[in-house]
Image (cartoon, coloured by chain):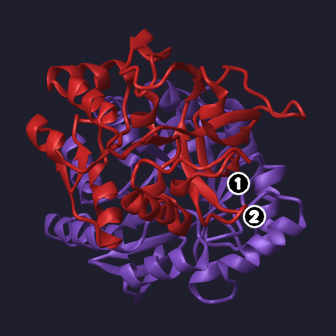
Chain colours: A purple, B red
Amino acid sequence: MLSKRIIPCLDVRDGKLTKGIKFKGNVDIGDPVEMAEFYYQEGADELVFYDITASHEARDIMLEVVRKVAERIFMPFSVGGGLRNVEDMRAVLLAGAEKISVNSAAVKNPEIISQGAEAFGSQCVVLGMDVLKVPVTKDIPSGYEMVIHGGRKHMGIDALWWAREAERLGAGEICLNSIDADGTQEGYEMTLTELISANVSIPVIASGGAGVPDHLADVLTGGKADAALIASMTHYGNYTVAEIKEHLAGRGIKVRNYW
Amino acid sequence: MIAIIDYDAGNLASVERALKSLGADCAISRDAEFIASAERIILPGVGRAGSGMASLRRLGLDKVLADSVAQMKPFLGICFGTQIIFDYSEEDLTDCLGLMLGKVVRFPLDHKDADGEPLKVPHMGWNGMSLKRTHPVFAGLPPEAEFYFVHSYYLQPADESEIVGTTDYGFDFCSAVAQGSLVAVQFHPEKSGRPGLRILENFISWDGKETGDAV
C-alpha cells in the first residue's frame, strides 16, 4: 500500500535557507545542503526547494545547491521558484532534481506545463498553486481564487478550474498552498484540499498551516491529500519527522517507517 | 565498467550519482561499441514507450541490448527501462525489446482500493515490495523496506516464476522480475534511500549466474 508522504519545504535565498512566515520577514537559518542531508537521514520522504531569489546570478547559486544536494541524498526532490521556460526547467533537472515546480509562470503562461510535460514527462512537472478563499462569484464558482506574488495579486482564475486544466495540460502532481492557512500553524485548509484532491486524478500535496502532527493526519485522511508539506514544524526542532510519522501511524495512516 | 544506457530517456545522472556513491565504475553512453564492451548494463529511464523504443532503434541499441542478455551479462532495468524489456506495451501500442515475455498495461482509469476509495494514477511515492523468491540482487532487504515509484503502467510477465516481488496498489502488481542475468524493477532504486542503494550495490557485485530460489 502506498505511503502518505511527508515533505519538508526548504526556502532558499541566495543559496541560503530561510523560512517565510506569510511570505514576509524571512530570516536565514542555515545551509540547504546540510539541511537536505539531515532530512534524508531523518526519514523525510521527499524534499521541496523553493528558490525565492529571482536574479540571474542567484539562479546559478541555486543550481550549485541542487547539484550538491543530488550528490548527497538519494530520494526525490523538486525545485521551484522563478522557472520561466523549458530551458530553466532543463537546467534544474540536469543538476539533479527529480521534479520541477511551476507556479505563477504557469498561471501567466499555461503552455509551460504542456511544454515541460512534453520535454521531460508529466512525472517531472509539479504545479504549485497559491490559493486564497474569496466570495463565490460567477468567475470564481468554487470560492477559491488563484493568486500570485504571495497573495498580493488576484488572477481572476478559479482554483478548481485551474487544477483540472493543469492536469489536462500534463501536470503530474499539484502542490496546493493555502495563503489563508500559510504560516498560521492552525492546520491545513481542509475544504480546499479535499475539493481539489477529489476532482483531479493526479496526487495532491497539501501545503500551508501545519502546526502539530494531527494537522497532517487530518489533511491526509479527511482532506484526501496524498502528501503533506511541512516547514516550521520541523525546521525549528519542535518535532522530528519520525515523531510525526509515529503519530500518523498511530492514527492508522500508512507511512514509510524504514529508511 | 557499467554502461548506463542513454537513449534520451531522462534523469540518467541520478543513476550515475548513486552508483558513484557506491564506488562503482560507470559511464552514461549511447555508443554501441562501448556498451557491447561493458561488463554490466543498466537500462534506466523515464519516458514514453513509443519515443523510447524509437530512440533505441535509431541508435541501434536494441540489438546490442539483446546481445548483452544473450551473453548473460548482468543487466538491470529501472522503471521505464524495465517496461520496454517486455514484448509489448499498451502505452502508444508499442512493440518493445522482447527480452522477457509479457506485456505492460495501464492501471485502470477508475482504479480503486479494497474499500472502494479512488486511487490516483500515476502510482507515485513510496511503497513496499513483498518478495516471492530469493535473489542475490534483492538480498539483505528488510521486509519493511519501501521504494520510490512513479508509473501509470505496470508489468504482466507471461511466466509468473520470473516475478521476484509484488507491490500492493489496489491489487498486487509485479514490481520486480528476474530471468537469467536480467533483473528489472518498476521503482527507482537510485531514489529509494538505503534499500535502493542496497539493490544497486548487490547488482554491482552480482555475477549474473546465481539466481536464488523460490520462497
Identify the residue at the far top of this view: B93
Residue under label 2: A216
**Percent x, y for residue A106?**
38, 40
Q: Residue at x 21, y 65 (%)?
A: A59
Identify the residue at the far front of this view: B209
Q: Which residue is drawn at 25% across and 60% down?
A: A95
Image height of A161 relative to A27, above or below: above
**Percent x, y for residue A150?**
46, 60
Give the amino acid at mark 2: Leu
> Residues at badges 2 and 1 in contact (C-beta under 8 Å)?
no
Residue in front for this viewpoint, A9 or B147:
B147
Residue in front for this viewpoint, B20 or A179:
B20
Does label 2 or label 1 sit earlier along the sequence? Answer: 1
Mark 1 closeness class: few <14, some 14–19, many ≥20 residues within 10 Å: some
**Circle on res. B92:** none
**Percent x, y for residue A25?**
46, 82
Residue in front for this viewpoint, B62 or A138:
B62
Q: What secondary structure is marked by label 1? A: loop
**Chain under disc 1:** A
- Is residue A66 in sight in this rendering? yes
Give the amino acid at mark 1: Ser
Residue under label 1: A3
Q: What secondary structure is marked by label 2? A: helix
Image height of B118 relative to B141, above or below: above
Asked whether, in this view, residue B30 is left or right of residue B189, the answer is left
Asked whether, in this view, residue A70 is left or right of residue A156, the answer is left
- Is residue A214 in sight in this rendering? no
The C terminus of chain A lies in quadrant: bottom right
**Chain under disc 2:** A
